[in-house]
Image (cartoon, helix red, strand yellow):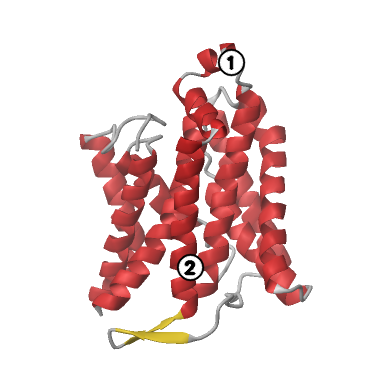
Amino acid sequence: MWQLILINGLISGGQYALLALGFSLIFGVARILNLAHTAYYMLTAFAIYYFSQVLDISLPLTYLLSLVFVVVLAVGVYQLAMAPVRGQSSTVMIVSLVLAIVAQELVLIAFGGQFRSLPKLVPGTIEFGGTLITYQHLFTLGAVLTVLLGVWLLLFKSKLGIAIRAVALDREVANLMGMPENSIATLTMAISVALAAVAAAMVAPLGVIEPLMWLHPLVVVMAAVILGGLGSIKGSIIGAFTLAFVEVSLVFLIPQASFLRGAVSMATMLLVLLFKPEGLFGVFMEGER
């Protein structure tokens, strides 16, 4: 059983880490709590389903088209509906929640509410400690860790990363130094949504997809980001993996209590807000390594 807990914990942790990292990035740069973030995760899964199952496009091209489609859509929605009210945090939260619900209802109208599955990119299985593990699990784990490494390199080893962190630390000073704050915020939104899209592309084939699939990840991502500290990159990743392993352990060790997965994240979020509201690493986009 420990093998399943390890593999599923790493994959769920990677999924939540990608989502939490994107959520934390856009908050750090634009000060936006984007409650529609995981809705883009859901839209990517259904875009993959539509391109591959309905239009019968090859899987590699399907994944590329889905990622581009969702990122372009998200940037357009950001420019039209969120950027104009960026300075009003409550308004942004309401707008983003409305956008998520609209996306959910549109998917319900287009595809119905039944569970669907996505084709696996890598078929086949391998034995690990007496347990059969699919190659898709291993591929997903490797892809997620590679993307996390790529984001770290982008943020800490590139000029764009320096600009993103500079804007997160002080927007006014960044503007005075010639860094176009609005353009960087838009680019950060694109990166944020791309991370959510990659999470869907890698993890969704391992389970089922349905129009409400964005709700539970949103709860976990918010709990992970608050646990790690709003805006902290390493805090978001650590919080995501911590909650993922707690969830997976709960499901495997106490199957009857699997419905409490969301309650665990909510309880964690509440306790952190009450006793350590700054989180484990209460900083935003600092020069962390």
- Label 2, secondary structure: give it: helix
Residue 163 visible at all: yes
Q: Which mark is residue 1?
A: none
| Residue name at image x 36 percent, y 58 percent | 262
**Residue 203 drawn above or below residue 118:** above
Q: Position of residue 223 (x, y in %)?
A: 35, 47
Quarter of the figure with the N terminus: bottom left
Q: Amino acid at mark 1?
A: Asn
Q: Amino acid at mark 2?
A: Thr
Residue nearest the observer in this picture, 94 or 242: 242
Q: Check disc 1 and report the residue beneath it.
A: 175
Residue sitting farthest toward the right: 55
| Farthest top residue in view | 176
Dividing the picture into quadrants, the one containing residue 163 is top right
Residue 265, given in percent of the width and then of the height, sits at: 32, 53
135 vs 107, nearest the viewer: 135
What secondary structure is found at the residue carrying circle 1? helix
Image position of 221 with respect to 201: above or below: above
Any part of residue 207 in sight: no
Residue at 59%, 39% in the rendered image: 189
